[in-house]
Image: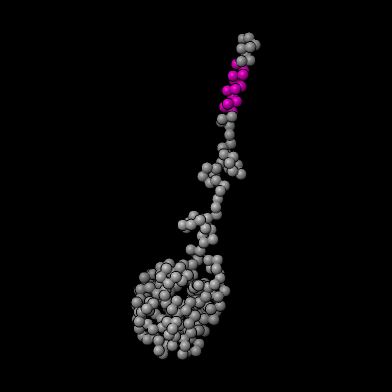
Amino acid sequence: MNDRRFWVLMMVFVCVGGVAIDCGCGDGDDDDDDNDDRADDDEHDDDVDGDDEDDDDDETSDDDISGEVWTDTVSGLMWTIDPAEETMNWAEADAYCNGSVYGGVDDWRLPTISELRSLIRGCDVTAPGGACGVTDDCLNAGECWSEVCWECVEGTGPADGIFWPSELRGPGGWYWSASLVADYSGWAWAIPFWGGDIDTYDMSLDVYVRCVRP
């Protein structure tokens, strides 16, 4: 083989090899992002917005709120989904709600009896507008309370026997309201949600606490 033919064949070999090297020896990374990981180049580009995509908006501030609070579309009030971890007397309950932070806000408080009553589901006589006369405008036990406030059938509420919305969690025992009994010192109005009743309760005793806002 003459020298010229030898060098021509060598040049073809080198060119063909160079093309193969150029096309087939990449590292798999698209080089459009700032890492060397090929697994996320096409599916998980570095443009991450921080939203958990579990809700219907582009905001990040409320992504975890749904686990802590719930807004009643009937009353417009926002409630803590879970009650306080421990039962407490009335004064402790009032301080607890005033000092709580849920959903990134700190204007929580103990609900009035009308607000607490707005949570009742499944018992018409104690639900808002029912025959039981106890409201924020009528807190005198002698005048406002009657046995009709006891007429719910215990354990027959729509939320596994409890007389409140299914969105709420916790024991169905007694819960404090902020409303004091006008004619009976040392007592406040409260609701045992397992029974759906409205009644008075000794403020020195410990019961459950659920906070509300605004």
Residue drawn at (61%, 15%) of the image: 8
Q: Quick check: 88 above or below 103?
A: below
Q: Is residue 42 visible?
A: yes
Residue drawn at (42%, 75%) of the image: 118
Residue 146: percent from left, percent from top: 37, 86
Q: Quick check: 5 above or below 162?
A: above
- Residue 26 is covered by the magenta coloring: no
Q: Main secondary structure of the magenta part?
A: helix
Left or right side of 109 for 192 = left
Q: Is residue 168 visible?
A: no
Quadrant assignment for the N terminus: top right
Left or right side of 162 for 36 = right
Furthest residue toward right: 3
Q: Nearer the viewer, residue 80 or 51?
A: 51
Q: Quick check: 36 above or below 53?
A: above
Location of residue 105 by image quarter: bottom right
How many marks overall?
A: 0
Residue drawn at (47%, 88%) of the image: 182
- Residue 12 is covered by the magenta coloring: yes
Query: Magenta region: which residues?
Result: 9-21
Location of residue 73 by image quarter: bottom left
Residue 106: percent from left, percent from top: 56, 70
Residue 93: percent from left, percent from top: 53, 78
Residue drawn at (55%, 42%) of the image: 41
Q: Nearer the viewer, residue 209 or 205?
A: 209
Residue 168: percent from left, percent from top: 44, 69
